[in-house]
Amino acid sequence: MEQREIKFNITVFEKESEMLKEDQELVAAAREAATRAYAKYSHFQVGAAILLANGKIITGNNQENSAYPSGLCAERTTAFYASATFPGV
């Protein structure tokens, strides 16, 4: 079995303009991804963006189904897509 370590850093800003340009690009990508969310039941569109070690930005969004409230959150779809498309990155 192989173990992998995942690290997260979280910083809170009062204004988006205080963020690094790279972070502003991630927020913009997540907002754009939210416009493609399938939120027919909650009407709450969510987008997520991940910056991979190789510099690629991966996005995803929430996907609901008729068995609401079950569905997939934006963060999960983004992480699964990143893992499937760029294994080992």
Image (cartoon, rainbow, N blue to C red):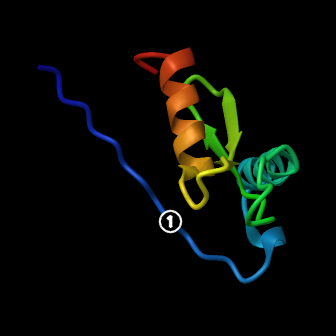
Which residue reaches farthest bottom? Answer: 14
Q: Position of residue 13 (x, y in %)?
A: 67, 77
Q: Position of residue 34 (x, y in %)?
A: 80, 52
Q: Position of residue 52 (x, y in %)?
A: 56, 31
Answer few, some or many: residues within 10 Å of disc 1's Cα (few below 14, many 20 plus, some between 14 and 19): few
Q: Residue at x 57, y 27 (%)?
A: 81
Name the amino acid, label 1. Ile
Q: Residue at x 77, y 55 (%)?
A: 39
Q: Residue at label 1?
A: 10
Which residue reaches farthest left? Answer: 1
**Towards the viewer: 41 or 59:** 41
Q: In the rendered view, would you say 75 is above or below 69?
A: above
Image quadrant in which you'd find residue 42: bottom right
Which residue reaches farthest front? Answer: 66
Q: Is residue 60 left or right of residue 28?
A: left
Image quadrant in which you'd find residue 8: bottom left
Q: Residue at x 66, y 47 (%)?
A: 65
Q: Is residue 11 left or right of residue 41?
A: left
Q: How many marks?
A: 1
Q: Position of residue 38 (x, y in %)?
A: 78, 47
The kind of secondary structure element at disc 1 is loop
Image quadrant in which you'd find residue 60: top right
**Towards the viewer: 27 or 63:** 63
Q: Residue at x 17, y 21 (%)?
A: 2
Quarter of the N terminus within the rendering: top left
